[in-house]
Amino acid sequence: MTGDIDLRGGISHVTDSGEMSDDVLAQWDPQTSVNVRTARVQTRHAGDWLRQNGRQRTRVDFIAALADNSTLRNELWWDEAVHVGPHRFVDSGLVEYRSETQEYRWIRE
């Protein structure tokens, strides 16, 4: 990933080059009020950040680090565009989620 943020893609698995493909989010419909493409883009951005960060992160951490770079209002960013996305990563074995602390951690390289 370059210094520029690609806000038009999806996310899936980590390839040998360290870049993410679109497999996990390609057919995902978040069923929110936000455009499907926008939700995929913002969720990919959140996944990239989580993968690069390397430690457990909460909803508050995601919002503080990423929502301001979105075209959505901060409160809408998580609730409508991203919230259900990280669980796609969990289901794919890319992310660990701890329900007791509501923390996400990227676990696959």
Image (tube, rainbow, N blue to C red):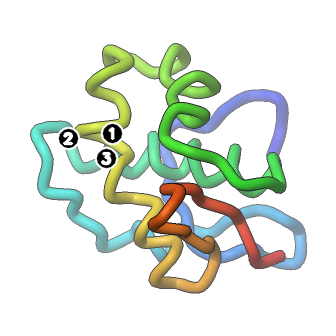
Query: Whole-percent x and y of residue 50?
Result: 69, 51
Residue at image point 53% right, 57% down: 101
Q: Is residue 95 above or below residue 56?
A: below
Query: Whole-percent x and y of residue 77?
Result: 35, 29
Q: Is residue 54 above or below residue 28?
A: above
Using the numbered discs, state the Cα–Cα distance from disc 2 to disc 1 in whole angstroms. Answer: 5 Å
Q: Amino acid at mark 1?
A: Thr
Q: Is residue 68 above or below residue 81?
A: above
Residue at image point 32% right, 58% down: 84
Query: Whole-percent x and y of residue 48?
Result: 68, 50
Q: Which residue is mark 3?
A: 37
Q: Which residue is mark 1?
A: 38
Q: Would you say 74 lies left or right of 43 here?
A: left
Q: Pointer 2: residues within 10 angstroms few (<14), some, or many (20+)?
A: few
| Tag of residue 10 | none
Contact check, label 2 and label 1, Cβ < 8 Å = yes
Q: Quadrant of residue 47?
A: bottom right
Figure label count: 3
Residue at image point 60% right, 34% down: 61
| Residue at the outermost right position | 17
Q: Quadrant of residue 74?
A: top left
Residue at image point 83% right, 38% down: 2
Q: Is residue 61 above or below residue 68?
A: below
Using the numbered discs, state the Cα–Cα distance from disc 1 to disc 3 in whole angstroms. Answer: 4 Å
Element carrying mark 3: helix
Q: Amino acid at mark 3?
A: Arg
> In the rendered image, which quarter contains the C terminus?
bottom right
